[in-house]
Amino acid sequence: MAEKPRIKLPKEAAKGEIIQIKTLVSHVMESGQRKDAQGKPIPRKIINGFTCELNGKPVFACTLEPAISANPYIQFNARIEEAGTFKFAWTDDDGSVITAEEKIALKA
Amino acid sequence: MTAINRRQAFALGGGFVALTMMPMAAHAQVSNDAAQSIAKFTGGKEPTKGRIALDLPEIAENGNTVPLVLNVESPMTADSYVKEVMIVADGNPNSGVATLMFTPLSGKAEASIRIRLAATQNVIAIARMSDGSLFTERKTVKVTIGGCGG
């Protein structure tokens, strides 16, 4: 359905460093407020939640409403204490989940 | 002769639209459930103004994507951090925009999203700290072209 989410974060960080993570996922975010050419309401279909964890520990999460723009862009930060794998997950109204992973290393 | 009639018809039509739109716009301001969702989030407690920086454009030309940057002042340690921030818009068909959940691992209680605004309205952020205290900030955004379908 959806394309691969775009995620931008540094490949490595110093211990204790706060890094910025930018994410963008392609999605129509149909608000449920619009009507089609026949005047029938278009049913709501949005990404309603997003989570990010590092090595299984929650870093950031959010719930999203129809007031979020199409192709939701979410930017947040993470404090890096250990190397590991970030797991990102976007939950769709239809129950499907878009997932992605990114690795981060500690600066030597 | 026909041209004048057409112009008159347009003028009349325009007036009619303006008349019918006005009560609707006024209605949208009060029908929205912003106050209820804020009350639900705060549990009736009055949030203190401050500690939140809410960065939104003063005038949004396109209500479909309005950049929003939120920053809450907090040390973000295990003892004291920002737990969650609810963002509501009081002039959209639904007041909810997003609820952001932070942890000490977030490092900074800062996030950026892009939101839809149907009309000129207030965007309100309410932050809940790990100790239960509440802070709030609001910003009015003038919207030239609304972003809620229609």
Image (cartoon, rainbow, N blue to C red):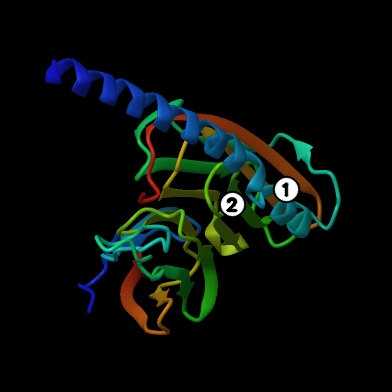
Query: Outermost residue toward the bottom?
Result: A95
The disc label shown at residue B122, or none: none
Disc 2: which residue: B95
Q: Quadrant of residue B54?
A: top right
Residue appearing at x 76%, y 59% in the figure:
B40
Kindly identify the residue that appears in the image at 43 percent across and 76 percent down: A93
Quadrant location, the C terminus of chain A: bottom left
Three-letter amino acid code at disc 1? Ala
Could you tell whether A73 is left or right of B120 in the image? left
Measured as percent of width and height from the top left, residue B85 is found at: 63, 53
Helix, strand or loop at disc 2? Answer: loop
SS class, disc 1: helix
- Nearest the eye: B92 or B46: B92
- Residue B64 image offset from top left, x and y in percent: 35, 45
Residue furthest to the left in view is B2
Q: Position of residue A38 (x, y in %)?
A: 27, 63
Q: Which residue is mark 1?
A: B35
Q: Quadrant of the N terminus of chain A?
A: bottom left
Report the front residue among B132 and B46: B46
- Residue B47: x %, y % from top left: 79, 43
